[in-house]
Image (tube, rainbow, N blue to C red):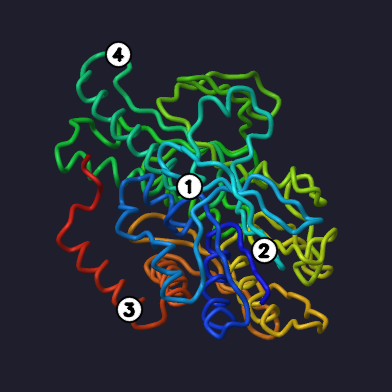
Amino acid sequence: MQTIVIVGGGAGGLELATRLGDTMGRKGHARVILVDRSPTHFWKPLLHTVASGKRDPQVFQIEYSAQAAEHGFTFMHAELRSVDRAARVLELAPCLSDDVGEVRATRALGYTTLVLALGAVTNFYGVPGAAEHVCTLDNVREAKGFYRRFFGACVRASEAAGKEGNAVNVVIVGGGATGVELAAELGYSARALARYKIHTLDPARDVRISILERGPRLLPHLPLEQSARAEAYLKSRGIEIRTGTAVTQVGADSVHVKEGEGETQLRPASLTLWAAGVEGPAITGTLGLSLNRMRQIMVRPTLQSVDDPEVFAIGDCASFVCPVKGAAPPRAQVAHQQAVFLAAALGRREGRPLPEFSYRDYGSLVSLGPVAAVGVLLGGSYGSKLPVSGAFANLLYGLMYQKHLMALHGFVRAAAVTLADWLRKRISPSVKLH
């Protein structure tokens, strides 16, 4: 019996393991194994809600072991150390604790087919001091750490009221979806913490949130009109937008910025969040596979790596380039489509040629807080674009997560989770208070 090993339990990896477990695993056609260094799954597009204190990850996380027991696959809580592609063996370091990073002696795991769904990590582009001083949102631990620092900065500034330097300066580097969504949510969180008397700051005056974007506008993947709408909304919420601004150096409490050909300026920063781009994780450089300049694994149209037909890559760690549409962006909808495609392709493989993956862009939505969003929907036979904004766009944004839940749990359980979330919002504080 073949062994299919999936490394990485993100949006694509967990859905692929669930689909293969329900089909090939339950029927005994294959042994399906999911490997991840965390014991739980949290949907990465919602990490900004953890970083703003809006969402408790312990409530919304999915236990890999429970998902495996219900869907016919095996979960291994371990970290990938190396791959011997000639022998088709993985070296794994089983984790004892996700928090302290302790590991036991490594063990070997053989595979017939290997699927790498390793996700992506923050790309600092070689900016001095960035790796040492900024916060990132690569996982739940980092998102929780950012909120603890934001919460603490507000409390300390409140205690220092009337003294010089009592303002909280949050600098977000990068005007893409992550940076914009976090900035919007942080504005609401600062007001909520003031309402609950956690701090005595004036949120509009003393909690200063700014977005620094190197390009000419925010959200470059959206149409110009929607980008301008998002910028106007953020400014109405008191968030400073600085486009055409490059960060040249990062310090412990400041950032060095340069606008165009102007002189370098120093900006105070109580907290700096880096959301300026991603790249493949460091482990991809040790596998002997061809990578692009963003350290992503180069794959064929079948999603097989260009170097090894028994190694597949999906999601943010994969470089899939369509000859017509170009490179697939690092988005959850790409990982979802690749998981659906590969689950069907591997189920019908058995010596037959694999089909080719085709990515369809359905558009993009960006949250602007609890009540608003902007985006564009793509569809129709002529690839028509439908701009959406406001409450309707916010509703559609929420439905993306429901779609992810239905892919993992089915309609009934996903509906129950949604109802529980709705009830929880009615009886719980709107932001985490500790």
User: Mark 2 near mark 1, Cβ–Cβ under 8 Å?
Assistant: no
Query: Residue 93 — which label?
Result: none
Q: Can residue 354 be seen in this view?
A: yes
Q: Residues within 10 Å of mark 2 (few under 14, many from 20)?
A: many
Residue at left 41%, top 32%?
170
Q: What residue type is labelled 4?
A: Glu
Q: Where is residue 78 in the image (x, y as percent from the top left)?
A: 53, 50
Q: Which is more foreground, mark 4 or mark 3?
A: 3
Q: Which amino acid does label 1 sit on?
A: Asn
Q: Is residue 156 left or right of residue 356?
A: left
Cα distance in 3D space between marks 4 and 3: 50 Å
Q: How crowded is mark 1: few (under 14 residues within 10 Å), some or many (20 or more)?
A: some
Q: Where is residue 86 in the image (x, y as percent from the top left)?
A: 81, 56
Kindly identify which residue carries mark 1.
Answer: 139
Identify the mark nearer the N-term, 2 or 1: 2
Q: Which quarter shows the C terminus?
A: top left
Query: Residue 115 — which label?
Result: 2
Q: Where is residue 391 in the image (x, y as percent from the top left)?
A: 37, 67
User: Mark 4 near mark 3, Cβ–Cβ under 8 Å?
Assistant: no
Cα distance in 3D space between marks 2 and 3: 30 Å
Residue at left 37%, top 59%?
61
